[in-house]
Amino acid sequence: MLNIYVIHGPNLNMLGVRETEIYGRLSLQEINKKITTLANELKLEVAFFQSNHEGEIVEYIQQAHYENVDGVIINPAAYTHTSVAIRDSISSVKLPVVEVHLSNTHSRESFRHLSHLAAVCLGRIEGFGAHSYLLALYALHNYLHAKK
């Protein structure tokens, strides 16, 4: 069974409460439940992690290397636009990583248009709300099976 880490960045613990017109009404727990349901259908094992702290996210990405994780889905949230450290950790583990965003970052403020992570990720899915995570899971599943 393939093992996937799903990493949620800062403020995503506030989903369903904060700016619901942008991020939707589902809580992080509800999104994780949808991901788990799809993962079970695809016969994938998923582990979830959320942190508001950059260093903890870096350490969790590094842990993926040592635990023989097959791929990562990450919503780095605001760290997308600021974190060279998270970018470098993705680059160092050499795992397929899919970057996810609930909103379309290019339809928002100009500072959200830059992703420091995109160049070291397998792909990027954004703008489909919670469904962005499910699309990422399908994409990663297909990529990993094609690679076998």
Image (tube, rainbow, N blue to C red):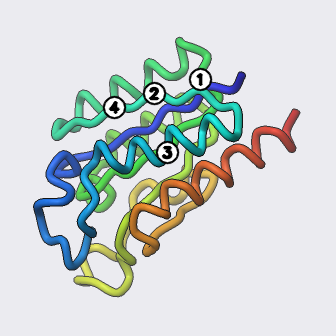
Spatial CA distance of label 4 from label 2 is 7 Å
Sequence-first disc among 2 and 1: 2
Q: Give the residue number, with chain letter if any, for mark 2.
A: 47
* Nearest-to-viewer mark from 4 and 1: 4
Question: Quarter of the image containing the N terminus?
Answer: top right
Q: Residue at x 38, y 82 (%)?
A: 106
Q: Give the residue number, with chain letter if any, for mark 4.
A: 49
- Give the residue type at disc 2: Ala
Vertical order, 36 against 109 (above or below): above
Q: Give the residue number, with chain letter if any, for mark 3.
A: 35
- Give the residue type at disc 3: Ile
**Residue 15: % across, % down:** 20, 56
- Give the residue type at disc 4: Phe
Q: Are marks 2 and 3 in contact (CB under 8 Å)?
A: no
Sequence-first disc among 1 and 3: 3
Which residue is nearer to you in this view: 74 or 13?
13
* Nearest-to-viewer mark from 2 and 1: 2
Spatial CA distance of label 4 from label 1 is 14 Å
Q: Residue at x 38, y 51 (%)?
A: 75
Sequence-first disc among 3 and 4: 3
**Residue 3: % across, % down:** 61, 25
Residue 69 is tagged as 1
Is residue 103 toward the left or the right of residue 98 in the image? Answer: left
Spatial CA distance of label 2 from label 1 is 10 Å
Q: Are marks 2 and 1 in contact (CB under 8 Å)?
A: yes
- Give the residue type at disc 1: Val
SS for tag 2?
strand
Spatial CA distance of label 3 from label 4 is 13 Å
Q: Are marks 4 and 2 in contact (CB under 8 Å)?
A: yes
Spatial CA distance of label 2 from label 3 is 10 Å
